[in-house]
Image (tube, grey):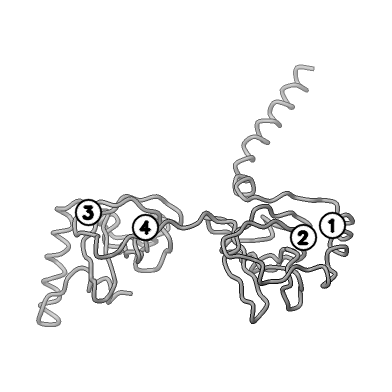
Amino acid sequence: LANDNSSSDSHDKKSDANKPKNNKKKKIVVTHNNNNNTSSNNNNNNNNPKSFKPLKDLKLGSKISGKIIDVCDFGAFVHIGYATRGSRPGAALLHISQIDDDRIQNIHDVLRKGDTVRDARVITVDSTKGEVGLSLRNPRHKRRDLRTVKTGEALEGKVDKIVPYGAFVDVGASVNPLLHISRITGGAIENIRHHLNEGDPVTVHVINVDLEKKTMAVSMLDRKADLYLDRRMSQKMKRFYGGAKGSGDRERDDD
């Protein structure tokens, strides 16, 4: 009996260890339904175009719930009971980018046909095309005007996109600044993903703001390391181009 309990405890621990993998599903306001027959019957009852509400009555920002009638690689179609047109009348598109604030690699790991989506936000209504877009993401806060950002200012942010030459960081401004690969550790980096990935929180400081180009550059290095890199780059620019460029221009050229 002791061995049986030990095995059971071990199994429970393994199950608990696997629970974090489902955190994304818990964040998303979806009720999973394994009864395919019930799902099919409900869809059939709701698919009569005569019962659809006029699209003009659907307001931007309103909340709506519905059952998923189809899942594609790019998103899920949710039956909302309004007069949308196309191959799935009465349905709205919940694009994969609008399912969660974190990036979703495979939509089929998160949503499936028959699931119920609750309190989705209406983000687009195109009466001409008969299309509606939904979102489960949190509404974005008002973006900070680039003109209010000052060089040297420290900012908290989250990595939005990884590129070969660095990362773009969402700091809540009207543009996402570039964190150049040379400004992450100060040393040589072969693979940036060994240091940063999408969604990672970072603390950076502003090293350049170009209002004309509407670009911004940030760094994770200390001030002394930044000054050293600035001098080195300035010397290289003078040697090869006959003049120096600011850090923002350099990173823009790399883009």
Sort mark 1 into few (<14), some (14-19) or many (20+) by Cα contacts within 10 Å: some
Report the amino acid beneath label 2.
Lys
Tell me the residue that label 3 is attached to.
Answer: 153
Q: Residue at x 65, y 81 (%)?
A: 129
Residue where numbered disc 1 is placed: 39
Instruction: Report whether 13 appears left or right of 148.
Output: right
Between the residue at mark 2 and the residue at mark 3, the CA separation in whole angstroms equals: 47 Å
Return the disc, 2 or 4, that comes first in the chain's sequence.
Answer: 2
**Mark seen at residue 163:** none
228 vs 214, nearest the viewer: 214
Identify the image quadrant of the N terminus: top right
Q: Are marks 2 and 4 in contact (CB under 8 Å)?
A: no
Which of the marked residues, 4 or 1, is nearer the chain's N terminus? Answer: 1
Mark 4, residue position: 172
- What is the three-letter code of the residue carrying label 3? Glu
Name which quarter of the figure residue 243 lies in: bottom left
Circles 2 and 1: CB atoms closer than 8 Å: yes
Residue at x 57% of width, y 56% of height: 100
The numbered mark, 3 or 1, whose residue comes first in the sequence reads 1
> What residue sits 69% from the left and 60% below the top?
108
